[in-house]
């Protein structure tokens, strides 16, 4: 029988650092889409309480330790880093773990690099946003050192290439 080996979307691609910026792959662990059924918002809020989280408002990211809940659209959020409870009666739950890849862009100037690719004013962005990166859908999550970007797994290498090219342009500009 053939033995399958699980690989990340960017297997073999190590981090790169240019002009004080670092681009790296991130292992998010389990990712679950959560969309509360109509009238079940309070029940979901009670279910999230043991995790120390509340359902995020638009452009919000809630975190408790390594567990995060990121707004991803109207009435929808991604639970990252933890398994959902037995919430099937109160919310639509969809495992997204294998469908997305995550990259981190850290360092001073991360906003300038992403400004070349993302049509969002990153200076005024909340903690999470759903947008596009070039021609790809992206979920942006801001953290103290930069950003995490989630893209569809099939677009991971393209996203990496686009961000790396923008980093090179930024480095060239700094060298002037």
Image (tube, rainbow, N blue to C red):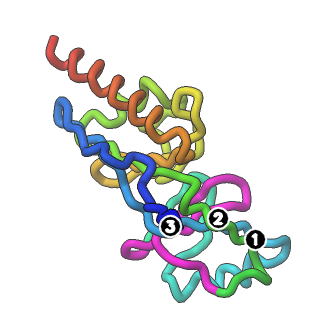
Of 158 and 47, which appears nearest the observer? Answer: 158
SS at circle 3: strand
Whole-percent x and y of residue 167?
30, 27
Whole-percent x and y of residue 15?
25, 44
Which residue position is annotated with label 3? 80
Characterize the local packing of mark 1: few (<14), some (14-19) or many (20 or more) Cα atoms within 10 angstroms.
some
Residue beneath the point at 21% across and 16% down: 172
Q: Earlier in the sequence, mark 2 or mark 3?
A: 2
Whole-percent x and y of residue 76?
68, 61
Of 5 and 148, which appears nearest the observer? Answer: 5
Is there CB contact under 8 Å for labels 1 and 2?
yes
What is the span of residues highlighted in magenta in the rendered image? 64-85
**Residue most extreme to the top:** 176
**Residue most extreme to the right:** 38
Residue 47 vertical placement versus 146 (above, below): below
> What is the spatial separation of the Cα atoms under label 1 and label 2, in whole angstroms?
8 Å
> What is the spatial separation of the Cα atoms under label 2 and label 3, in whole angstroms?
9 Å
Whole-percent x and y of residue 20?
17, 36
Which residue position is annotated with label 1? 92
Residue 91 vertical placement versus 174 (above, below): below
Residue beneath the point at 72% across and 67% down: 35
SS at circle 1: strand
Residue beneath the point at 20% across and 31% down: 18
Residue beneath the point at 42% across and 37% down: 123
Q: Which mark is residue 33?
A: 2
SS at circle 2: strand
Q: Earlier in the sequence, mark 1 or mark 3?
A: 3
Q: Is residue 95 left or right of residue 101?
A: right
């Amino acid at each position: 029988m053939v033995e399958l080996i699980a690989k990340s979307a960017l297997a073999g691609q190590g981090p790169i650092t240019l002009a004080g910026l670092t681009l790296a792959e991130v292992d998010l662990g389990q990712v679950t889409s959560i969309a509360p059924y109509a009238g079940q918002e309070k029940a979901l809020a009670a279910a999230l309480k043991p995790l120390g989280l509340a359902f995020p408002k638009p452009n919000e990211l809630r975190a408790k330790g390594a567990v995060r809940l990121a707004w991803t659209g109207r009435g929808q959020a991604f639970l990252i880093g933890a398994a959902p409870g037995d919430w099937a009666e109160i919310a639509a739950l969809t495992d997204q773990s294998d469908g997305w890849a995550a990259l981190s862009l850290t360092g001073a100037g991360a906003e300038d690099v992403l400004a070349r690719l993302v049509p969002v004013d990153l200076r005024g962005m909340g903690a999470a946003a759903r947008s596009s990166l070039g021609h790809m859908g992206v979920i942006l999550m801001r953290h103290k050192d930069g950003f995490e970007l989630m893209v569809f797994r099939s677009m991971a290498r393209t996203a990496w290439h686009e961000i790396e090219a923008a980093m090179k342009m930024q480095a060239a500009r700094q060298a002037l």
